[in-house]
């Protein structure tokens, strides 16, 4: 038999460290403390393929 005691540790497991409890709705996560977390993804305009005039207009608007 292999002695597993040498490779075990008493620290918290991964599931103890992450705050996620359940999926409350589409894009909304219920956390262990009862709070809700939501996330969004935003992709701005592609500045690599924009002309100088387009980049200047975006800078002016910001």
Image (cartoon, grey):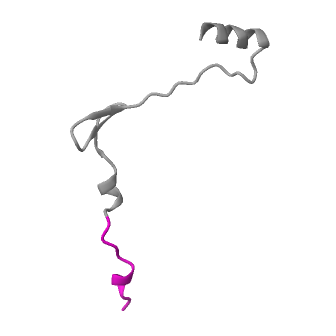
Q: Is residue 40 left or right of residue 53?
A: left
Q: Which image quarter is the N terminus in?
A: bottom left
Q: Quadrant of residue 44?
A: top right
Above or below 21: residue 61: above
Residue, x 24% and y 44% (percent of image)? Answer: 32
Q: Quadrant of residue 39?
A: top left
Residue 46 image position (x, y, % from top left) = 68, 22
Residue 4 image position (x, y, % from top left) = 35, 83
Residue 49 image position (x, y, % from top left) = 76, 21
Tell me the magenta residue range: 1-11
Task: Depth check: give the residue in front, 53 or 26.
Answer: 53
Residue 21 image position (x, y, % from top left) = 27, 45
Q: Is residue 3 left or right of residue 49?
A: left
Task: Depth check: give the residue in front, 17 or 43.
Answer: 17
Q: Residue furthest left?
A: 34
Prevailing SS of the magenta stretch = loop
Q: Is residue 3 left or right of residue 60?
A: left
């Amino acid at each position: 038999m292999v002695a597993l005691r040498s490779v075990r540790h008493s620290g918290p497991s991964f599931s103890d460290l992450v705050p996620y409890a359940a999926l409350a709705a589409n894009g909304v996560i219920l956390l262990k403390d009862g709070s809700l977390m939501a996330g969004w993804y935003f992709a701005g305009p592609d500045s690599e393929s924009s002309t100088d005039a387009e980049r200047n207009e975006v800078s002016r608007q910001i």
